[in-house]
Image (cartoon, rainbow, N blue to C red):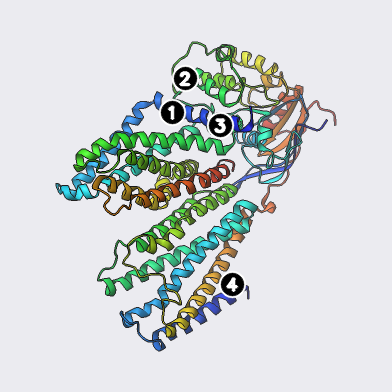
Amino acid sequence: MSPIVQARGLCRRFGQRWAYAHIDLEVAEGERVLLIGANGSGKTTLLRSIATLLQPSLGQLSLFGMDPKTHCIDIRQKIGLLSHMTGLYEDLSAADNLTVFGRLTGSGRVDVREVLERVGLIDRRDPIGGYSAGMRRRLSLAHLLLRTPQLTLLDEPFASLDPEGVAAVGKIISQMPGTVIMASHQVQQAAAISNRTVLMESGQIRWMGPATNAWSAWRSSQVGEG
Amino acid sequence: MKWFHISAVMGVSLLCIGHGLGLFVAPPEAMMGDVGRILYVHVPTAWVALVVYLISFGAAVGSLWFGRLTWDATVRASVEVGVVLTALLVFQGSVWARPTWGVWWAWDPRLTTTAIMMITYVAILIMRNAIQDSPRRLVITAVATIVAFVDVPIVYFSVKWWKSLHQDHSSPDTVSDPMILPLRLAAIGMLLLALGLIGARRKTELDRLNQEVDPASLPEPIEALSVPGESE
Amino acid sequence: MSPLTQSAHQVLSILKKDLLIEWRARTRVLSLLCFTAIILLLFSFAVGPDTATLRRHCGGYLWLSLLFCSTAMLSRSLRIEEESGAMDSLLLAPISPIWIFLGKATANAIELFIIGLMTLPICFALCDVAIADSAWRLLVIIALGSAGLAAPGTLFATITERIQGQVLLMPLLLFPLVVPMLLAAVKSTSLILTGDLMDEGGDWLTLLVFFNAMYWPLCGVLFERVVEV
């Protein structure tokens, strides 16, 4: 079976700076890939390119066997993204936001209550503009759960969460069907629910290996070994 | 010597001949006298400015269609030359208006829409300079240039649509015979000069854009990490 | 659901979403209305107590006020999409950018139309005018003028919200472009208020329709290129 994600020589430039370069990556169906790396190592930019929101400057990218330049809508129907930002409207409540996006995604009748309960936001009716960082994260996850994408991209899913929240989100992610690519600084928690790890440094892939070696790889990159 | 050098030299030569004929050989204009000789500068500038904006429009469409930097460089070059020509046009118009209408500026539709058109394209250049990302800059410049071009036919037809102090379009039907040759020479000269300037500017811009996205500027591939405990 | 029905459904959903957001934050609409009223007042102060001049140029003051109001309104309309990454969510829904544009530009046109209607009584009072011709025609002019501002305005607001630190670019790009449309709106409004003896109103109305017919499809197609880059 052909890989879900196939990247060859992928590079992306912003002005004078290369955000990522020489990216060769294949992700098979059902894999759980963890991206780790320091801030500014290119993880977010790479995830956005895989999500078809940012075109690479050089190289080839194939998603579900399709070219994102020509099959954008078809690919996006199969992708879900949890990004740094909430991706929702600050002036609307959590329930309003999910109802709006439930209609827009064509998910049919969405049980907004059930989704909010899963992420622990059931009692809030105020606009999300006043939410804390942790609540925003949980709401973004709720937004993602409106659909069941074949490829889920998660950018720092554990950011701003307390230990209870981390455990709950970890459980939700482990139960997600399909393929998952996740970028996270919480190396140990994320590696526990992944099967492969990719270490990025200065926009390039420096190491790829089983998730069980993720922490060792991270430590090695930090102390300058290898 | 590149094609645009030749075009510019030919353009300047024809302009000299055309303006020379217009200033010293052609008869004075029937109503405006010698003041009317600015016709040989002003009218070609107006025609060529509109042609240059048409080139920018075509290049912008090409930019969006093909996504290549050559088209993007052509858009920038033609917009810049167009802005310079339009600024000259407005200046020449003022110089002509003073002895003719008694004012440096009149709220005439053609004058007003020409000034507006110049501001639009200046805004596009300002906007372009504010965008660092090459693909985004290409697309946004092209989009803005296409939309701005909508203004150009409105400028051209403004004389017909609104009551105007400005005289009607100059053409071989409205201009007497002795004036046609210097006018044509000046127009062709101005066009060749404009094309030469566009070509030269396009080259410098293309060199700069290519340097930005030059794969040779890619970082060296990073050394792989060796993780303790992993087998060789 | 057929593709056409689904697209119509998406456009309507985006339109409803935008109107819901404006309803939830309706003090903002009041602020825009006050802003428009202040500009009208400033025009009156600048002209002075010359009622004949005020009456003659009432259409111009009305549309200039709406134009200034539109820059604040349109910038805001696109900022709510960019500030929290909601535009990415819309694209990944997935919704074609053309339908996103249709929904948002229509919502912007409706909001401008409402502000225009609410500004009319203020304008009539300050300039001492009344409707000399058909009131329905005036409504159509305000609708077409609002739509003519909303389409290119939505496109340019999208462009400029993605360029950091360039707040002035939106009016700088939009104002020159909409001048011909604005002229048609001003002329046709003035004829409604002062009387149309030469029966020129129809021509200006045709121009307004023409501008809308040109701007909406063009801006819709170009919007897709802008958001996808």
Q: Nearer the viewer, mark 1 or mark 2?
A: 1
Asked whether the beta carbons under mark 4 and mark 3 sit within 8 Å of each other, the answer is: no
Residue under the point 35% across and 52% down = C183
Q: Quote the CA–CA distance across marks 4 and 1.
A: 54 Å
Q: Nearer the viewer, residue C130 or C167?
A: C130
Q: Which residue is mark 3?
A: C8
Q: Nearer the viewer, mark 3 or mark 1?
A: 3
Chain letter of the residue beneath label 3 in the structure image: C
Asked whether the beta carbons under mark 3 and mark 1 sit within 8 Å of each other, the answer is: no
Residue under the point 43% across and 50% down = C173
Q: Nearer the viewer, mark 4 or mark 1?
A: 1
Q: Is residue C83 placed above or below C63 in the rendered structure? A: above
- Are the numbered discs 1 and 2 placed on the same chain, yes or no? no
Q: Quote the CA–CA distance across marks 1 and 2.
A: 15 Å
Q: Is residue B41 visible?
A: yes
Chain letter of the residue beneath label 1 in the structure image: C
Using a 10 Å C-alpha cutoff, classify the residue at mark 3 as few (fewer than 14 neighbours), some (14 to 19) or many (20 or more): some
User: Outermost residue toward the left?
Assistant: C49
Q: Specify the amino acid type for callout 2.
A: Ser
Q: Nearer the viewer, residue A147 or B231?
A: A147
Q: Is residue B195 placed above or below C21 in the rendered structure? A: below
Q: Is residue C137 placed above or below C2 in the rendered structure? A: below
